[in-house]
Image (cartoon, rainbow, N blue to C red):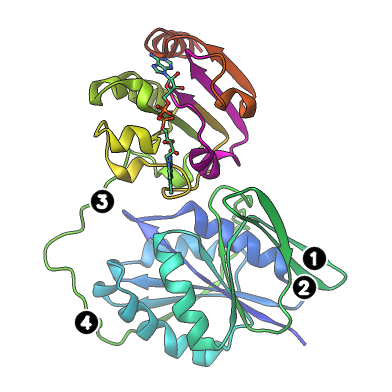
Amino acid sequence: MSKTFLIVAEHRDGKLRQVTLEALQAAARSAQDGDAIHAALLGGGLDALASELAAYPLAKVHVIENEGLNAYNPEAYVRALTPLLDALKPDGLFLGHTAIGRDLAPALAAKLSAGQLSDVTAIDQEGGEVVFTRPIYAGKAIEKKTFLAYPWVVTVRPNNIPAAEAAGGGAAIEKHAAAPAADLRTVVRDVVRKTSGKVDLTEAKVIVSGGRGVKNADGFKPLEELADLLGGAVGASRGACDAGYCDYALQIGQTGKVVTPEIYIACGISGAIQHVAGMSGSRIIIAINKDPEAPIFQLADYGIVGDLFEVVPLLTQEFRKV
Ligand code: FAD
């Protein structure tokens, strides 16, 4: 019997988040011929985004309209999505493994009486079954799982599954009026987003990360310069955050963010296991540390033994020439 999959799309500052397109690809990898993939977009003033999403291989884009949904609110989101879930009865639901996805997925799974799997990094079909891969024990082991029954809810780790490509098609766009925003929580003033710059840390292709070796808040400046030049984001170890050199929003690791960029440049970071838990999935790891015995070198693809205050500006200077 053909299946129905639904992606809960995320948008920020008028743009679709990259992880939404990765979730779409995840759904495509779970689907067989004849299955339908739908997307739900929540918020107000989303006509342009809905048209953009409709260019991807989707059966339908459902716009759940309410200005109040532009800011995430779990009760309001669940309430707004419920009529669509009731109508579509999706067999599989896909969300990004983001702050929103992590919060919303279990609530929707409970609503659907569905199984749930978080932080999926790969999806394959084996013998007619959809097999999900995900890291466990802070990345020390990888497990492969299948569900015994539909429906299920899955969150997809950003930067692991390639984003779906626009097919140039025109999926139908259906507008749904949303129930009024839930009154349990409302944004009274403004949402203050703490970021490490223009690029979202979990979606960045390049991360330049600083540890206690940066010495103070000013020590992050050369790292920011390099990250800006490479179109990346700045991250940090907990050591640097605890020392007050930067905000905890930048922390990468077991108790911080999990990142999987193409290039991770660790500057003055020793490579404690709790830090490694958040960045070991990076494609290329470059470590800059003045201690040749630092554990980060065991993990690094390229290691530079030296003072980060000399090496980082030199790298920036060289990359500027390219
Ligand atoms: P340090 O270990 O002090 O290393 C600093 C490094 O900088 C050294 O290797 C030194 O050689 C090098 N250095 C110094 N000066 C220079 C220079 N001028 N140039 C080049 N190199 C230089 N940590 C995290 O990062 N993320 C987490 O999520 C996290 N969660 C934790 C959870 C728990 C329950 C616990 C117990 C710990 C957690 N930690 C976490 C902390 C972790 O154990 C380490 O203490 C922390 O990662 C160390 O940070 P660091 O590498 O910046 O500092």
177 to 207, vertically: above or below: below
Residue 197 visible here: no
Indicate yes or no: mark 3 CB to ligand 1 under 8 Å. Answer: no
What is the span of residues highlighted in magenta in the rendered image? Answer: 266-291
Label 1 Cα crowd, 10 Å radius (few <14 / some 14-19 / many 20+):
some
Give how far across and how far down residue 205 sits, in percent. Answer: 51, 37
Tell whether 46 sits left or right of 38: left
Tag 3 residue: 193
CA distance separating discs 1 and 3 = 38 Å
CA distance separating discs 4 and 3 = 21 Å
Rendered image: mark on residue 125: 1
Front disc: 4 or 2: 4
Q: Earlier in the sequence, mark 1 or mark 3?
A: 1
Q: Earlier in the sequence, mark 3 or mark 2?
A: 2
Tag 4 residue: 184
Identify the residue shown where x is 57% and y is 61%. 23
Q: Earlier in the sequence, mark 1 or mark 4?
A: 1
Tell whether 229 sits left or right of 184: right
Identity of the amino acid at label 1?
Answer: Gln
Give how far across and how far down residue 52 sits, in percent. Answer: 47, 59
For the residues labelled 3 and 2, say whether their Cβ atoms are less than 8 Å apart: no
Rendered image: mark on residue 32: 2
Identity of the amino acid at label 2?
Answer: Gln
Q: In which quadrant of the rendered image does the N terminus lie?
A: bottom right
Res 220 quadrant in image:
top left
Residue 75 visible here: yes
